[in-house]
Amino acid sequence: MALKNATNFRDLAANVSAPLRRGVLYRSDHLGALDAEDAQAIQSLGVKRVLDFRGVHERTAAACRLPGVQVHSLAIEPTIVQVLSDLMNAGHSLTESDVVAHMQDTYRGFVRTSTHRFAEFFAHLLESSEPTVFHCTAGKDRTGFAAVLVLRALGARDDEVMRDYLLTNELLKPERIRGDWALPEHAAKVLYGVQPAFLEAALAEIDAHWGGMDGYLRVGLGLGEGERQRLRDLYLAAG
C-alpha cells in the first residue's frame, strides 16, 4: 500500500515465504502525519490496534492521526541523535564509522535495556490477531527489531528476515523524519537508513547473554512453548 505520509508502511507477511497471515500485522513509520486519504486507506484494512514504540516527546509532537484505534505506548526513548549532537557540540568530527558504531550501540541497547518493552509487545500480540500496526518514528530501528523478533518467532528464514529489515532503505523518505538537528550529510545518510551491521549487533548481544534467539524468546520475552503455539495459531495461515 502506497501512503503519502507513512511511506514505510507494509504488511509484515508480504516479504517472507513463511505462511504468515496477510492483513493482520503491519509495520510502519509514525502515524502522526496521515492525511484523510492515508487514514481511510489504513482504516479499510480493519486496523483497530496500534503499538507505538516512540518516546514521550515523539508521541506528543506527532500524535496518531488514525481515528477509531486503541493506541498502546511501548515507549523506548530515542538516544542516538542526542549522542551524535553531543559529540558534534564537543568538537568531534563525525565519520560514517562513528555513526555506525553508535547505531550498533543503540541496537545492543534494545536487548540490554528494552527487552521488557518487546515482552509487552508480544503480550499484546498474544491477546488477539485483530489487525495491528506497530511503529516508531521512522519504522526502521525499534520497529525493525520488533519485526525481526516476530518473524523469527513465526519461523521465517534468516535471509527473509534480513530482506524485510533492509526494505526500509527503499521505502523510507528521510525528509519525513528529519528533525531540526544539523548533521553532516555523510552522517545523516547512515542515520536515516539501516544496515546489516546494526541488526547483527543486537543478534550478537542476544547470543552473548541469552544463548541465542530461542533463549531470548523463551526467557527474555516470556514466550514458552504455549505462547509460541498461540502465536502460530493467531498469525500463521491454516494448512
Image (cartoon, helix red, strand yellow):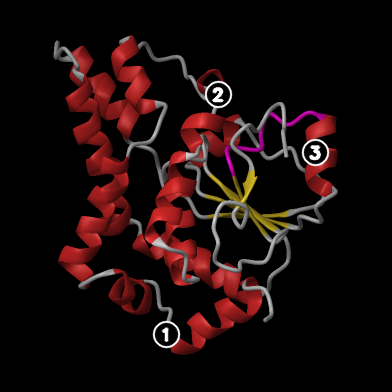
Q: Residue at x 36, y 19 (%)?
A: 188
Label 1, label 3: how far apart the Cα atoms are: 36 Å
Label 3, label 2: how far apart the Cα atoms are: 18 Å
Which label sits on residue 214?
none
Figure disc tally: 3
Task: Confirm or deny contact between disc 1 and disc 3 (CB under 8 A).
Answer: no
Q: Quadrant of residue 127?
A: bottom right
Residue 187 in the magenta stretch? The answer is: no
The residue tagged 2 is 173
Sequence-wise, the earlier of marks 2 and 1 is 2
The residue tagged 1 is 224
Q: Could you say where residue 185 lies in the image, as x and y percent from the top left?
A: 34, 11
Q: Amino acid at mark 3?
A: Ala
In magenta, the rendered stretch is 28-35
Which label sits on residue 39?
3
Q: Residue furthest bottom?
A: 226
